[in-house]
Image (cartoon, rainbow, N blue to C red):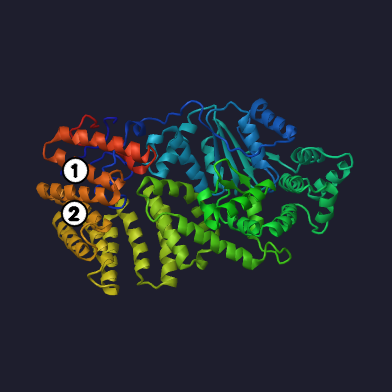
Amino acid sequence: MTGTEPHVEAAGDRAVAVGGNIGRVATGDYVTQVERAILLPPEALAPAVCPDGLSKIPRKAVRFVGRERELRWLEEHFEAQGHRVVALRGLGGVGKSTLAARWAGRRGDHPTWWITAESRADLDTGLADLAGAMQPALIDVLPQEALRQRALQWLSTHDGWLLVLDNVTEAADVEDLLSRLAGRGRILVTTRHAAGWHGLAEVLDLTVLDPEESYAMYAQAVGGLGPRDGHHVETVCATLGHLPLAVAQAAAYCAETRTTPAEYLDQLRRYPGDGQEAVARTWRLTLDRLVAADPLTGTLLRVLAWWGPDRIPRQLLDRLGPTPVVRRAVGRLAAHSMVTLHEDGAVSVHRLVQSVARTADAHDPHRRAEDIDAARALAEETLTEAVPRGVGGATEWGAWRALFPHVETYLGQVDPAADTARTAALVDRAAWFMVEHSDLLRAVHWFDRAVECRERVLGADHPDTVASRQGIAECWAIEGELWSSADLQERVVADLERVLGEDRAETHMARGRLAVTWRQMGDKDGAVALMERALAGLEGLLGPDHRDTLRVRSNLGVAYQDAGRLEQAIALHERTLGERGRLLGPDHPETLTSRLNLVRLYEAVGEVERAVAEFEAVVADAVRALGDEHPFTAHLWHIRPPGSPWGL
């Protein structure tokens, strides 16, 4: 605090007062099932601090050949001439990212941070991730925009760092960032686009490999050449335009199949073309052989084309067929440099290979339009089956973290006008994950997309359509737009009463959600009455120990406490805790939430020591069971029971 903030105050057990913008404050366990008031930790009030040795550089290539001239150019322009921003510009597959990773790995700059910056949203996410890497305790406390600003603040006030912005689509996407960070650390950009860099960056146009370099790359990959191979290798490389990606794939094919350069050249001549078509040509030859031995390889590559290019997790791959069969196909693709297989079983695919795989070609039997569309449908079905329906437990959270980049990439490549009911279900679940990450603007956008699709496919009154509208209302409530949220939630309840009936579980759940908003608006009596009605209905329909029943009962306990009915609140929370423990286990976040609700109540009735002891126990159990990065654990570090030694 600076001593200049306006005086603010709040009354009531769960009232919150702040003298400035702290993001969001939530009480009760609705939405995330974490009863909390989010209070900024000391780290958030002080400038960002970067730990020693912070570095994030992808491993782009095991084999690196040539490019000494370009490496010297980068050295000279960053060091001798003092340039702060350099753009590596060239066509896809020419090795821009590989060269950037090679040069960055040789530097002593700290931190060195790599951001895949295909869009402004990607850039914002990468900057937020940098702030999170600097101060992990803030990851699930501050929204993405606040984390992004912390990263920018640190970068704009420090020297000696290197930022790599990979695969930038348009210069305009990074212009503001480059202007803000001018004169500080170094920024290395990779891009396919020629226009717009004048005045922003010193440009190095990266061309294809020199003939001797592509020859060396081929020779290194095949492990040696015979005395008669030299001329044919030179011709193969020239036919492929000395494009590194195409040369690497051709060499991998020859090494794996024991095909001589002369034999490969004969095959290659059947498919004329040059430039970026070289990748499609090597793709055709490689898949001709692979598919003949294993048809799954072609299907698999077309499916992988719809997901994110980096680290597609094994849990997705294994859903595409019997595990041994899928892994054998992945191994064959990796052996031919069509994919990169990581030690943990994850797979990465070059963007250019993905682009070829998604592009129909009537003359290529591996790129028929109907096969590509079938692969897209399979990619969507696999994602929809893999993503959890919630983000509660440690297993669900871990799955979402691994899968979300691929959900995001897939949905970004599909025309919303072609969305199906299954697509909308995937969009809706991903939007709830964004809510958990406080990425509310995008969450509302995705809920809107789900609503639009479901209105078109299912109808405006379908319960799934109404549920997506409920998601929009939740985002508004978290943002503090309580009146707008309540208005939309009241319409949701009315729609469900009309379409499903007044005594349906979905209708009672919607009433319970509306009651939470009424409580936040200060209508304590109205919230209690509506929640009691919802709870009675759910107990009758689902039973007293159903998970949804327990959620409403937990929120009713919070409403009782707000209304000063502490004995009833304690009895309700103790009952809920016991039933959640039996249903979900003692370490589930919802069970731990019930324990936190009791912490607040113990303090409210004057049992401060008991409250503090129980809070410490909840923290210890969450760290043990969920890990430090789970949202529940991250928030726990910043919960301070009133009157406790941790009070701010």
Q: Residue 427 falls in which quadrant of the image?
A: bottom left
Seen in the picture, residue 480 relative to 530 is either above or below; the reply is: above
Screen quadrant of the N terminus: top left
Q: Nearer the viewer, residue 420 or 182?
A: 420
Quarter location, residue 389: bottom left
Q: Which residue is mark 1?
A: 598
1 vs 2, front mark: 1
Question: In this picture, is 114 found above or below 450?
Answer: above
Disc 2, SS = helix
Residue at figure coordinates x 28%, y 48% from the top left: 590
- Of the numbered discs 1 and 2, the one sitting upstream in the chain is 2
Q: How many marks?
A: 2
On screen, residue 520 versus residue 346, left or right, reads left
| Apparent side of residue 378 relative to residue 246 in the rendered image (left or right) | left
Q: Which residue is mark 2?
A: 556
The residue that appears at 50% across and 42% down in the rendered structure is 126
* Residue 375 pos. (x, y %): 58, 62
Question: Quadrant of the rendered structure where residue 488 is?
Answer: bottom left
Q: Position of residue 342 (x, y in %)?
A: 58, 42
C-alpha gap between disc 1 and disc 2: 13 Å
**In the rendering, at what x and y percent does residue 15 appear?**
20, 44
Q: Nearer the viewer, residue 324 or 29?
A: 324
Mark 1 element type: helix
Q: Amino acid at mark 2?
A: Leu
Q: Position of residue 352 (x, y in %)?
A: 66, 51
